[in-house]
Amino acid sequence: MERLRHADPRLFEIVTRKLVRWAADHMAQFAAARPGAPRLIVKSKPNQPLEVSQPSLADGAGLALAFGTTERGVASILLNSLINAACDGTPGHPPSEQDVNGVLILPMPALAWISLIRATHW
């Protein structure tokens, strides 16, 4: 840190210009990049809690990005709320892996509406 405080300010200007130029040159690639929806492994049995896991670190990062948090507890609560709001399931007939992953494909504004409708009408 100390070396950066005493560095020539022109170096930062040069680096800033290069970064801006690089971002401008690659803007189309950024705009076209659409990461896939995160996927979960779900094991469901009647009258048992769902077992949910992430098949890869990228899926975990995708969930963290979608939920806006890296706190595992908060993400777990949000995921549980999302599954409860969007998946039709009962203890005797819990949602399947396909049901849960189908919910994760929805855009976040749609998920917010589902949660709101479920909370006010069920």
Image (tube, rainbow, N blue to C red):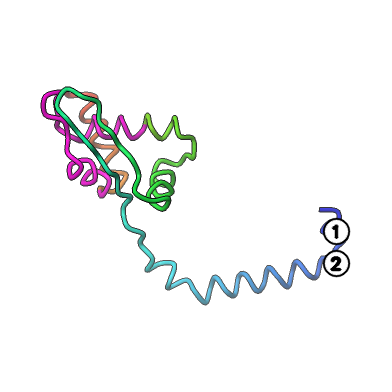
Does 56 lie within the magenta span? no
Instruction: Pick the residue in front: 16 or 98.
Output: 98
Front residue of 5/42: it is 42
Name the residue at 37% across, 50% down: 59
When the figure is inspected, residue 73 is found, relative to residue 40, above or below; the finding is above
Say which residue label 1 marks: 3
Q: Position of residue 88 (x, y in %)?
A: 14, 32
Earlier-in-chain disc, 2 versus 1: 1
Give the residue displayed 80% in from the left and 70% down from the top.
10
- Residue type, numbered disc 1: Arg
Residue furthest to the right: 6
- Residue visible at 85% across and 58% down? 3
The crowding category of the residue bearing disc 1, from other C-alpha atoms within 10 Å (few below 14, some 14 to 19, many at least 20), is: few
Where does the magenta region start and end?
Answer: 78-105
Q: Which residue is mark 2?
A: 8
Q: Is residue 120 above or below residue 60?
A: above
Between the C-alphas of marks 2 and 1, the distance is 10 Å
Which residue is more in the foreground, 120 or 81? 81
Give the SS element for disc 1. Answer: helix
Q: Looking at the picture, which amino acid does disc 2 mark?
A: Asp
Percent position (x, y) of residue 18? 65, 74
Pinpoint residue 66: horizontal percent, then vertical percent. Answer: 39, 45
